[in-house]
Image (cartoon, rainbow, N blue to C red):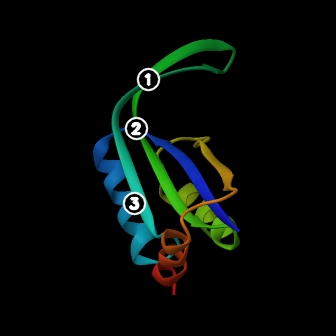
């Protein structure tokens, strides 16, 4: 089974760092970085907002716990967003490429 993982980060530098670490450790096959998103959220009892970057990560479900552990260890946020969604179907050659990239 495959997953897409959303990870928000404070800035482009942190986005690139986390993406590169995940790729070097072969925990992910691909990371898209969406620059300059605006997030509104509830934090410590108040509505807050932040300019952030979004990482869209493609990987296998079996790598999820390692990814969470690694991201938590290098992320600047107290409670980073790390949300995994299942990929229920996809272009088989692309899914095969994910497998090959994680070896």
Q: Mark 1 points at which residue?
A: 50
Q: Is disc 1 in contact with disc 3, using a CB cutoff of under 8 Å?
A: no
Identify the image quadrant of residue 79: top right
| Left or right side of 99 for 15 | left
Q: Position of residue 65 (x, y in %)?
A: 69, 66
Identify the image quadrant of residue 37: top left
How packed mark 1 is, by other alpha carbons closer than 10 Å (few <14, some 14-19, many 20 or more), is few
Q: Where is residue 88 in the image (x, y as percent from the top left)?
A: 70, 56
Residue 5 appears in view = yes
Q: Mark 2 points at which residue?
A: 10
- Lower position in the chain sequence, tag 1 or tag 3: 3
| Left or right side of 32 for 100 | right
Residue 70 appears in view = no
Name the residue at 39% across, 52% down.
32
Report the mark closest to the observer, 1 or 3.
Answer: 3
Name the residue at 48% across, 58% down.
74
* Distance between the alpha carbons at the discs numbered 3 and 2: 13 Å
Name the residue at 71% across, 68% down.
1
On residue 19, the disc is 3
* Distance between the alpha carbons at the discs numbered 2 and 1: 8 Å
């Amino acid at each position: 089974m495959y997953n897409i993982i959303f990870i928000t980060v404070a800035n482009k530098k942190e986005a690139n760092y986390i993406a590169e670490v995940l790729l070097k450790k072969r925990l992910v096959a691909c990371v898209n970085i969406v620059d300059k998103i605006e997030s509104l959220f509830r934090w410590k009892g108040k509505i807050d907002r932040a300019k952030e970057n979004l990482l869209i990560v493609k990987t296998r479900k079996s790598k999820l716990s390692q990814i969470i552990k690694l991201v938590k260890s290098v992320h600047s946020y107290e409670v980073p967003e790390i949300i995994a969604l299942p990929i229920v179907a996809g272009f088989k050659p692309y899914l095969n490429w994910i497998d090959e990239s994680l070896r």
